[in-house]
Amino acid sequence: MARAQIQSEAPGLAARRIAADIVEGVLRGKRSLDDHFDGAQAHPALAAMEDRDRALVRMLAATVLRRLGSLRYLLERYLAQGLPKDAPRVETALLIGIAQILWLDVPDHAAVDLSVRLVQADRRAQRYPGLVNAVLRRASREGIADLEAAPATIDVPSWLSERWRKAYGDDATDAIALAQRAPPPLDITVKQNADEWAARLRGHVLPTGSVRVVAEGAVTRMPGFDEGAWWVQDAAAALPARLLGDVAGQNVADLCAAPGGKSAQLAQAGAKVTAVDRSSPRLSRLKQNFTRLGLDCEIVVADITAWDAPQFDAVLLDAPCLATGTIRRHPDVAWLKRDSDLESLAGLQSRLLDAAVAMTKPGGRIVYSVCSLEPDEGETQIASLLARNETVERDAIAADEVGGLAEIINAGGELRSLPSHLANPDPRLAGMDGFFAARLRKR
């Protein structure tokens, strides 16, 4: 859509309309949130929008997905006859409207008006502006109070919360669910001088060495981005590469490497990095990132389980997984993944682990990691590997290797971070991705 057409609409309506399209694309089309913003399948209207408006679209869509359980709880409470089955845009307009009223800095009257306009502009929903108006006005009066009785895990699919309660207990599960409600902080990995960059970006250095900031505006316009002084990487995601220790001068393979944050860490530390991934487009992004950062690595497009690999001094495997540890950052994950996905992923992870061991020299280190909260993809995988392969042994991780955060080291000497770790009174500066990592040594 042309910029002139976007600007001719009521102020803010274009952003709500595009956000509505994206929410429906995730919930009904089963496409990821990122796919709607980047790449060949991105929403076509985004290209004509200013950065500020694009950020608003993402905030609207992400807030709806992050609080979808709460929103649907209220809709069920307020709609005795349920939602109209012939007009899906009604539900979407209500989700976006209530999200703005309860959690975003949007005047109630503006949120109501724009949601009413959304249904008026939809052929199948044109009959329901009165319904939308009434529900949103009730939400503005009663929504916060009505949610007080809802469980902490209301925004988590029941199959996930049940798994977490079994793995971590009730209190930890509630803490995870509450942590995932807030928008995530922005963590960056700097090449050097973390304290100086923290001061320049008005952030602070975390115990793990990452710099945490409150983002204001587009990341690409922040000081140091164009110069390649740093890259965006969650504090937990930055830990696995560091667990390989001193890699200067070593030949290191980063498996399932794209988009390249861990490869960049290894290259910056002086390793001779081979970045391997089966996705050529994702590796193209890695190459772009390395060009900006002024770093070098060898790039290999390959299926790791079938790759005729050389021998490496060290191997980092960040395996494909359910990614349930990143729901705060990628709220669509909660609604796109299923319990049934675990079996096929677990099989793939086992094959990748076997391949990683095979390409590691005797005496070399292997770090296996997943951004998942599911023990089946973490602790269970490592226990199974050690049971079937006597050539590797666990190399326990010490708390001082992760900034002294003893709470993220489990009894087996493995890293297990939760979204509720790294507490901070300011929710914008609290938490980290849920990650598992284990370090192994080949005998």
Image: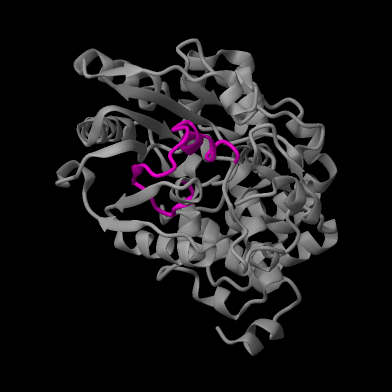
Q: In which quarter of the image is the C terminus?
A: top left
Q: In this view, does 421 lie to the left or right of 410?
A: right
Q: Report the front residue among 112 and 123.
A: 112
Q: Residue 151: percent from the left, percent from the top? A: 66, 24
Residue located farthest toward the front when viewing the structure as drawn? 249
Q: How many marks?
A: 0
Q: Is 251 contained in the magenta span?
A: yes
Query: How is the rendered protein coloured?
Result: one colour
Depicted 157 relative to depicted 226: above or below: above
Start and end of the magenta stretch?
235-262
Answer whether residue 359 is visible to the viewer in this image.
Answer: yes
Q: Residue 124: percent from the left, percent from the top? A: 53, 67
Q: Residue 54: percent from the left, percent from the top? A: 64, 68
**Residue at coordinates 80% horizontally, 51% vertically from top-left?**
199
Q: Is 71 contained in the magenta span?
A: no
Depicted 49 relative to depicted 416: above or below: below
Answer whether residue 126 is visible to the viewer in this image.
Answer: no
Q: Report the front residue among 270 and 396.
A: 270
Q: Quadrant of the N terminus?
A: bottom right
Q: In this view, does 294 lie to the left or right of 126?
A: left
**Residue at coordinates 37% horizontally, 65% vertically from top-left?**
284
Q: Residue 262: percent from the left, percent from the top? A: 46, 46
Q: Is the magenta stretch mostly helix, strand or loop?
A: loop
Q: Is residue 72 left or right of residue 395?
A: right
**Residue at coordinates 55% horizontally, 77% vertically from top-left?**
47
**Residue at coordinates 73% horizontally, 71% vertically from top-left?**
12
Depicted 192 relative to depicted 25: above or below: above
